Image (cartoon, grey):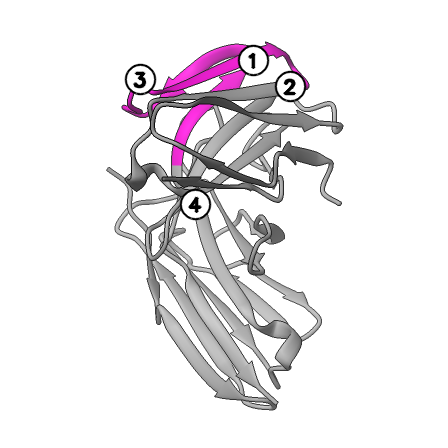
Amino acid sequence: TQLLEQSPQFLSIQEGENLTVYCNSSSVFSSLQWYRQEPGEGPVLLVTVVTGGEVKKLKRLTFQFGDARKDSSLHITAAQPGDTGLYLCAGRGSSNTGKLIFGQGTTLQVKP
Amino acid sequence: ETGVTQTPRHLVMGMTNKKSLKCEQHLGHNAMYWYKQSAKKPLELMFVYSLEERVENNSVPSRFSPECPNSSHLFLHLHTLQPEDSALYLCASSQVTGNRNTIYFGEGSWLTVV
């Protein structure tokens, strides 16, 4: 069974601080996605990484896929209150039905 | 607006009731999904339909019954649920091609079983 472990599970920081969220597994994934979910809403896709070692930037967010495609990280620079939410990583397994394995999520609270 | 619409957004039902959740996708995708999201637990995949055929059923109790009449619509029929079934039920869709299979979620249906 493929599992994704996210850490930390909860993070509360002040506006302007930097943070990193980790997503780790012992399994190899063909791709990995990061989602952000606000309370009462569904998850919204932020990025998909496919190639080992790939780095993608989305404004103040930097996503990295591990060289072995078993782990990923999300780094936020100068966090803003609008970054508050639940961040989910999801790895795509080998099934061609597109099944995603989700981590348990990291709840981020950015205080003004 | 993600192109995946779920109704109702909120549902309260008794344990003996029969109700249904509805999902419609306007993205032309060929796969649709039901996920369950409970507090402090990872998203749980319940059912997958690809080209209107159920391809995955992750040991979900029979009190949950999915229906996919066409590629744009997906239902989750609910019958004699238990209080522990209270959760956010998320519908999603995707176009299954290669390994960039991006899943788009609806806003979810909050279900409370009393």
In the image, the segment drawn in magenta is B45-73
Q: Position of residue B83 (x, y in %)?
A: 31, 39
Mark 4 belongs to which amino acid? Gly
Instruction: Locate the N terminus of chain B and report the quarter of the image it occupies.
Output: top right
> Would residue A94 be seen by someone viewing this image from the given angle?
no
The mark that comes first in sequence, 1 or 2, is 1
Q: Residue tagged by mark 1?
A: B68
Instruction: Using residue B30 as the reference point, say whether residue B15 is left or right of it.
Output: left
Between the C-alphas of marks 1 and 2, the distance is 6 Å
- Give me the disc on residue B40: none
Q: CA distance from mark 3 to mark 2?
A: 20 Å
Up/down of A71 relative to B68, above or below: below
The structure residue drawn at horizontal position 60% and vertical position 91%, both measured from the top left corner, is A16
Q: Position of residue A39 (x, y in %)?
A: 55, 60
Q: CA distance from mark 2 to mark 4?
A: 25 Å
Of labels 2 and 4, the one closer to you = 2
Q: CA distance from mark 1 to mark 3?
A: 16 Å
Q: Quadrant of residue B45?
A: top left
* Horizontal and vertical percent position of residue B74: 58, 20
* Front residue of this view, candidates B28 and A107: A107
Q: Secondary structure at mark 1?
A: strand
Say whether marks 1 and 2 touch (CB < 8 Å). yes
Which residue matches tag 2?
B73
Q: Are marks 2 and 4 in contact (CB under 8 Å)?
A: no
Q: Chain of mark 4?
A: A
Quarter of the figure that contains the C terminus of chain B: top left
Query: Looking at the rendered structure, which numbered label has been put on residue B62?
Result: 3
Q: Amino acid at mark 2?
A: His
Q: Are marks 3 and 4 in contact (CB under 8 Å)?
A: no
The residue indicated by pointer 4 is A91
Q: Are marks 3 and 2 on the same chain?
A: yes
